[in-house]
Amino acid sequence: MAASRKVATFRLPPLPTIGEIIKLFKLRALKHLSQNFLLDLRLSDKIVRHAGNLKGAHVCEVGPGPGALTRPILNAGVAELLLIEKDPRFIPGLQMLSEAAPGKLHIIHGDILTYNLANAFPQHLKKKWEDDPPKIHIIGNLPFSVSTPLIIKWLENISERSGPFSYGRTQLTLTFQKEVGERLTACTGSRQRSRLSIMSQYLCTVHNCFTIPGQAFVPKPEVDVTIIHFTPLVQPKIEQPFKLVEKVVQNVFQFRRKYCHQGIQILFPEAERLKKAEQMLMEADVDPTLRPSQLSMFHFKNLCNVYRKMCDEDPNLFAYNFREELRDRKRKNNSNLKVTEDDSLF
């Protein structure tokens, strides 16, 4: 009991402000890394509150930078905080925080896109997938250039129950460009409905927490920033391999303003394209004149199930890529054209 009271009542000692840290270590946001600093600690506190109850939790913060989110995370009473920071310029300032919170902070200089979180937390925290989420959270003010590839990577981890999700249904609270946040949470029929909508919502409950205006960041980005909270579902809404779902969804949204049958067609080689697409749509009970944004999760579930059956019947089908067929045809046409030109010399 004494230990739990200690966790709950921990507060950081007085420290330089984030602005002072930036001046002290002569930090500046790098445009090519999509860096933007959040200086308002009230907004940082709000982001951390939306992550849920962090008392006694083990937290991984992605890209802490000068530490704007790090401070309220520590003040929330976490058991341990793992920081993963790619930019070495921020490490000295984070080490200052580590000294102010002895034993609570662990700093990794590394890239979250390649860093393996499978063994980042104590093994006793592991829970069964059907149980409540473990006392593990991932929080991050992500650079725009990293946010989409990172969430796709983590969604694949969720589908495989690997990486940070080998501990159970680990929750995520992350920042995104407002437009990306709208895509992640868009409902059926919405103008923002996209590949990201389906890929995130078939695996997670996705909640739009709130939006921060761009002027709250330094330097000010051209867009606003949205905080999104993810909780993995006990049962995915589509029970097929991640790569198969991704391929079907990507192809359907390849022609997002056209009828969905055009995206379905390019799942198949040109010689049998129309016949196979018609078969897939019929067996999935999907109206070929619906737009991609009008397709519900149930439609995508049916499409993926039928495509899986067709791939099982034809082992070469899943490897087919319409772009490769286009490139092969172009090379063949160029080769034929060269032969014709050479013939004309004689």
Image: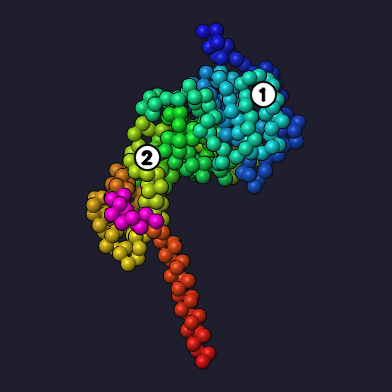
Name which residue lies at 45% across and 73% down.
332
Percent across and percent down for residue 319 are: 39, 56
Residue stretch rendered in magenta on the structure: 308-319
Disc 1 designates what residue? Answer: 98
* Marking on residue 202: 2
- Give the foreground label among 2 and 1: 1
Q: Nearer the viewer, residue 151 or 104?
A: 104
Amino acid type at circle 2 is Tyr
Left or right of 221, for residue 1: left
Q: Residues within 10 Å of mark 1 (few under 14, many from 20)?
A: some
Amino acid type at circle 1 is Ser
Give the quarter of the image for residue 96: top right
Percent across and percent down for residue 266 are: 37, 60
Q: Is 317 covered by the magenta stretch?
A: yes
* Marking on residue 17: none
Q: Residue furthest bottom?
A: 346
Instruction: Count the numbered circles shown.
Output: 2
Q: Is 51 covered by the magenta stretch?
A: no
Q: What is the CA distance from the residue labelled 2 to the residue labelled 1?
A: 38 Å
SS category of the residue bearing label 2: loop
Q: Residue furthest top?
A: 2
Of labels 2 and 1, earlier in sequence is 1
Percent across and percent down for residue 171 are: 46, 30
Give the quarter of the image for residue 205: top left
SS category of the residue bearing label 1: helix
Task: Note whether residue 299 is visible.
Answer: no
Name which residue lies at 57% across and 34% down.
62
Q: Nearer the viewer, residue 216 or 228?
A: 228
Percent across and percent down for residue 290 are: 30, 53
